[in-house]
Amino acid sequence: MSARFGKLTWLWLSVLVIVIDQITKHWFEANFSLYQKVDVIPDYFAWTLAYNTGAAFSFLADHGGWQRWFFAAIAIGVSVVLVVWMKRLKATETWLAVALALVLGGAIGNLYDRVVLGHVVDFILVHWQNRWYFPAFNIADSAITVGAVMLALDMFKSDKSGESA
């Protein structure tokens, strides 16, 4: 039966990412005002509340609203592909299953925000001495990033091509 479902048992990790992402976003919306900043590590790390109507790094955020549905459609398409991919994984491809589950959970977490709220809720702010700011992000973004790095590292595994390093 496990061969029939591939690595879909790792969907629990996607669900965990979605739950943690949504709980943290709701907490920050309930306890912060928009753009309020609370330093956690002064000059380096802060909590804030920001809304992003665009994609990564607020790409297309200043457009008329069509991007909300465009990015939602992309997230749905990617999510379907990821589930099918996970279903087709072999028993030995656990690393890849974890990577895909993280990306899937993050994609769905941000998809929910985009469809229901009309924007993605961000609250983690990394900066350097108030001179340089990385765009605010959230748990879903973090899961997508970690999953993408894991996918990239998976490409370099020597057993992928059938050759040993």
Image (cartoon, rainbow, N blue to C red):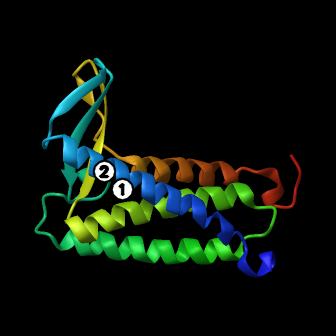
Position in image of residue 39 (x %, y %): 26, 24
The x, y position of residue 14, in whole percent, is 53, 61
Q: Quadrant of residue 97?
A: bottom right
**Mark 2 neighbour class, 10 Å CA radius: few under 14, some 14 to 19, many 20 or more:** many
Circle 2 is placed at which residue position? 25
Q: Secondary structure at mark 1?
A: helix
Q: Report the amino acid beneath label 1.
A: Gln
Which residue is located at x 44 percent, y 46 percent? Answer: 142
Q: Would you place residue 153 above or below residue 62 in this image?
A: above
Mark 2 vs 1: CB contact within 8 A: yes
The answer to whether residue 148 is above or below residue 87 is above
**What percent of the width, then of the height, locates residue 40?**
31, 24
Residue 140 in view: no
Q: Position of residue 65 (x, y in %)?
A: 14, 69
Q: Nearest the camera: 41 or 76?
A: 41
- Residue at image position (27%, 66%) is 114
Q: Secondary structure at mark 2?
A: helix
Viewed as shown, does residue 153 lie left or right of 132?
A: right
Q: How many marks?
A: 2
Categorize mark 1 by other alpha carbons within 10 Å: few (<14), some (14-19), many (20+). many
Amino acid at pointer 2: Lys
- Which residue is at a point 10% across and 68% down the rendered structure image? 64
Mark 1, residue position: 22
